[in-house]
Image (spheres, rainbow, N blue to C red):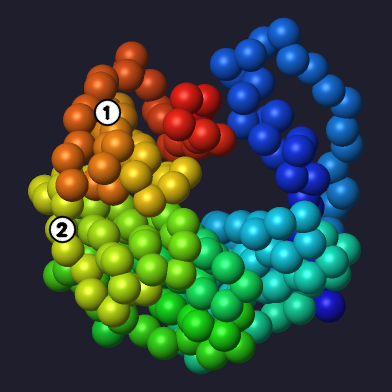
Amino acid sequence: MYRIAFFSTAVRLLFTFLIFYPALSFSQSWNNQFTGQAHLFGVHFLDAQNGWAAGNRGYFLHTSNGGNDWNRQNTGFADWDYTSIRFADANHGMATINNLPSRFNLSITTNGGAMWSGQMIGLGYELNSLAFVDSNHAWIAGSEGIYCSTNSGLNWTVQVANDMFRKIVFVDTSYGWALNDLWDVYRTSNGGRNWSSQSLSPGNYLSIAFADTNNG
C-alpha cells in the first residue's frame, strides 16, 4: 500500500483560486501519506474517489477510495521519469516521459493503467504537460511546442511549433490555455486550430489552471 497527501476536490479548486480571490478563506489540514521511495511529479483525479500519481523510475500509483490507500501499477518502463499524468475516463490515460534520449516520450493506457504502451511524439524531445478531456481529444505541451490528437493518441499534429511550453490545460474540446517559458499565456477557443497569446508580467510562472472558460 502507498499513501499520498491530498485535498478534497472542492478544496483543491478553492486553493487554485485563492490568488485571484483574496476574500475567500478556508481551514483545511493536510494528511501526510507515505508514497514509497520515489519522487512524484504528477497527480490527477477523475472524481472524489479515483486518482493516479506518477513520478520517477516508472513509478505509478492508483487510488479508488479518495486517496486513503494507494496501490502501485506496473508500467513496464521502470527506468523512465514521468512528468505529468491525465485520465479522460476510468480506462483512457496518458503520461508524459522526460528521459532523453529514449525510445518513447509518452505512455498510453486503455484499461485503467493495467497495461501501458510507449509512443514517440515529434522528434522525441521532452514533454512537460498534457490535457486529456475525453477518450479521443488530447493535447501535449513541451520543448517542441503543442501537439493535438483527435483519435486517442494514435496520431498527433503540430498546432504551435518552435516554442517551449511548461503547462497546458483544456476545460472541453474547444477552450484551452498554455503557458510558455517566456511568461506568455496562449489561448484557443476552437480546439487549438488557432491560438492567441498574451504576455504576463515578469515572474517565474510554473503552471496554469482553469475551472471553466472564464475562471483561472
Q: Is residue 97 above or below residue 1?
A: above
- Give the residue pinned by disc 1: 184
Residue 68 percent across, percent down from the top left? 87, 63
Q: For the point 56% across and 58% down, which residue is it?
A: 42
* On screen, residue 165 above or below 1: above
Q: Which residue is mark 2?
A: 158
Residue at 32 percent across and 19 percent down: it is: 200
Q: Looking at this view, is 202 or 85 the one in front? A: 85
Q: Does dot 1 land on a helix, a strand or a loop?
A: strand
Location of residue 26 by image quarter: top right
Front label number (2 vs 1): 2
Q: CA distance from mark 2 to mark 1?
A: 19 Å
Label 2 residue SS: strand
Mark yes or no: residue 78 visible.
no
- Mark 1: amino acid: Asp
Return the x and y of residue 87 as percentages of the image width and height: 54, 65
Asked if residue 194 is positioned above or below residue 141 in the image, the reply reads above
| Horizontal and vertical percent position of residue 101 | 25, 76
Q: Residue at x 47, y 25 (%)?
A: 214
